């Protein structure tokens, strides 16, 4: 169950980052709500997940979900760079998280 909560925490992080991007474009209540709500949900769920998971692994997975999610959505919806080297480094992030979990 903690892993499912952690995945949702990572998704909340992505929502918060998207809200931050939106806030930079439009300063309105919806943008503030999206950013603050996403980050709040993310931190609350991360805290819950860390009651059962080790801090290092939980934090690594949480940040990886946020990093990969925000980067991929930036590529798809905001026209950010899709250079092969950039995608390679995203794959390295996934590999690093898998390695941390395997060595736990």
Image (cartoon, grey):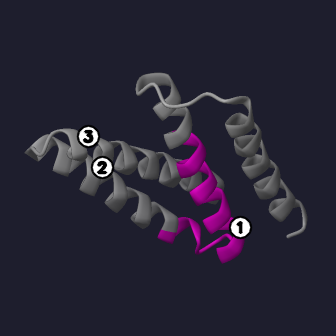
Look at the numbered disc 2 and give the secondary structure of its residue. Answer: helix
Look at the numbered disc 1 and give the secondary structure of its residue. Answer: helix
Q: Quadrant of the N terminus?
A: bottom right
Q: Position of residue 74 (x, y in %)?
A: 47, 33
Q: Quadrant of the C terminus?
A: bottom right
Q: Alpha-carbon neighbours of circle 1 within 10 Å: few (<14), some, or many (≥20)?
A: some
> With 97 as the anchor, is 77 left or right in this view?
left
Dot 1 or dot 3: first in sequence order is 3
Q: Which residues make up the magenta segment?
A: 47-69
Distance from the alpha carbon under mark 1 to that under mark 2: 26 Å
The answer, for residue 54, to whether it is visible in the render is no
- In the picture of the structure, the residue carrying the numbered disc 2 is 20
Q: Is residue 22 magenta?
A: no
Q: Position of residue 26 (x, y in %)?
A: 15, 39
Distance from the alpha carbon under mark 1 to that under mark 3: 30 Å
Mark 1 and 2 residues: CB-CB less than 8 Å, in contact?
Answer: no
């Amino acid at each position: 169950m903690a892993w499912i909560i952690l995945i949702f925490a990572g998704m909340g992080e992505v929502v918060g980052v998207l809200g931050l991007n939106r806030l930079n474009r439009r300063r309105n209540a919806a943008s503030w709500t999206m950013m603050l709500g996403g980050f709040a949900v993310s931190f609350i769920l991360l805290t819950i997940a860390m009651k059962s998971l080790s801090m290092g692994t939980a934090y690594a997975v949480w940040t990886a979900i946020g990093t990969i999610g925000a980067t991929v959505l930036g590529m798809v919806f905001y026209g950010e760079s899709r250079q092969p080297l950039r995608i390679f480094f995203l794959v390295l992030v996934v590999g690093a998280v898998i390695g941390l979990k395997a060595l736990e």
